[in-house]
Amino acid sequence: MQFRLNGGDRKCKVSPRTLLVDVLRDECGTTSVHIGCDEGICGACTIFLNGESVKSCLVLAVQAEGKDVETLEGTGSVKELDVVQQAFGEEFALQCGFCTPGMVVSARALLKNNPNPTDQEIRAAMVGNLCRCTGYQNILKAVKKAAERLQSG
C-alpha cells in the first residue's frame, strides 16, 4: 500500500487484516499513536485521515491507500510546539502522557471545525478520549486557551 504520512510518501506491505495503528507504529515508527483499548473507546490512537479525525485501531491499513495520514509527529516539533500542544503544557492538561497525543489530535479536529467552542462543545468533542490521570478540567482549559490563541492570530 502507498499513502502520505505527515507529508512524506510511504510504501508498506500489509495483509488485508492489518490495522492502521499497527502499520503506523510497527512499520512507520510513529510512536505518538498509542495502542490502548483496540476497540475505539480510549482515543489514544486518534489520527487525521484525509483531514478527518479517526481512531486508527478501527481502520484497516488498506483503507489508507492513497490517502493522507497525519499523526502528532506531523504537528509542530519538539523545538516549536503548535498552539494546542503549547496550551496542553501550559495548562497542565497531561500527566502520564499516554492519552495526550490522541487528546491533542481530537482538540485540533474540534478547533478546525469550530474555532470558538463552548465548554459543552469541547466536552462533547473530547468524549471519545479517555484519561485515567486527570480530572479533565485542565484539558478543557487547554482547549479553550488554544481556541483563544487561534482566534487572536
Image (cartoon, helix red, strand yellow):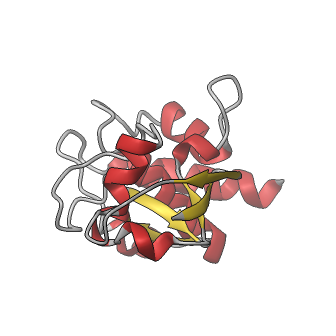
Number of callouts in the render? Answer: 0
Q: Is residue 135 left or right of residue 149?
A: left
The correct choice, above or below, for 78 with respect to 101 in the image is above
Q: Position of residue 49 (x, y in %)?
A: 53, 69
Whether residue 114 is visible here, answered yes or no, is: no
| Residue at the extreme right | 153
Q: Residue at x 59, y 50 (%)?
A: 145
The correct choice, above or below, for 55 with respect to 30 in the image is below
Q: Position of residue 115 (x, y in %)?
A: 66, 70
Q: Residue at x 27, y 30 (%)?
A: 96
| Residue at the extreme top | 79
The correct choice, above or below, for 100 with respect to 110 in the image is above
The correct choice, above or below, for 7 with respect to 126 in the image is above
Q: Is residue 27 left or right of residue 48?
A: left
Give whichever of 58, 27 is nearer the camera. 27
Whether residue 14 is visible here, answered yes or no, is: yes
Q: Position of residue 51 (x, y in %)?
A: 61, 71
Q: Residue at x 50, y 56 (%)?
A: 105
Give whichever of 147, 19 is nearer the camera. 19
Image quadrant where residue 50 sits: bottom right
